Image (cartoon, rainbow, N blue to C red):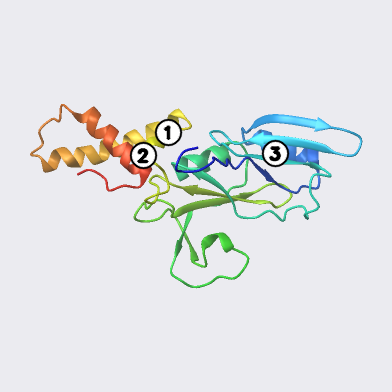
Amino acid sequence: MTDKGLDMKFEIVVIPVADVDRAKEFYARLGWRLDADFAADDYRVIQFTPPGSGCSVIFGRNVTAAAPGSAQGLYLIVSDIEAARAELADRGVGVSETFHPEGDVYTGPDEPYLFGRVRVGGRDPEARSYRSFAAFSDPDGNGWLLQEITARLPGRVSADDTLFSSSSELAAALRRAAEAHGEHEKRNGGQHDENWPDWYAEYIVREQAGKELPL
């Protein structure tokens, strides 16, 4: 056993639905992977996994006693909030406009996922990680949130665990690195940096690990 202790990987979230086939059609339309559809006389279990996710959802008949639609604040982390929102809209999903939290006014229990802040339309004006959202619900009213995270807070990710779950996620990181590297070259007299691959790699690793970014 290593110093970090035994791995405990979060695997499943159970969501309560009233109409199993309707829910199955909805989550398939999202483009999520269907992992299982098992049925017996008194139960049915369906499992879907979002693209790039290590955690899945299950629903079905006699899976949970929770009221249909009672699962709220289910987070889906994305690297580009506008691209993710556009993809859902293209799939015919009713997704909100992009918004961000602002201020410290408590808005009540209906929006606990905003950490008690006021919802303001549009992406975070400073493009800060963790601060831009969009929301949608499944046919039963279970509430999902898209949250844009481009750089983790310090300590959230080990530098040894830098990875990407899709080519689009890696491409977004490369674009951010390219923009930052352009500023780096300007600060150094506009000279071409022949070691740009090393600089990109250092930038991306530090960004994911929540460390100070190179200049």
How many numbered discs, if any?
3
Determine the image quadrant of residue 196. Answer: top left
- The amino acid type found where label 1 is placed reads Leu
Indicate left or right for 152 with 85 as reference: left
Mark 3 Cα-neighbour bin, 10 Å: few <14, some 14–19, many ≥20: some
Q: Give the CA distance from mark 2 to mark 3.
A: 37 Å
Above or below — where is 153 with respect to 103?
above
Which label sits in the foreground, 1 or 2?
A: 2
Q: Circle 3 sits in a helix, a strand or a loop, which is it?
A: helix
Of 35 and 119, nearer the camera is 35
Determine the image quadrant of residue 90. Answer: top right
**Residue at which label 2 appears:** 159
- The amino acid type found where label 2 is placed reads Ala
Residue 5 place in picture, x, y as percent = 50, 43
Residue in the picture at 39% in, 49% down: 155
Indicate left or right for 214 with 113 as reference: left
Residue in the picture at 84% in, 32% down: 39
**Residue at which label 1 appears:** 163
Mark 1 Cα-neighbour bin, 10 Å: few <14, some 14–19, many ≥20: few
**Residue at which label 3 appears:** 26
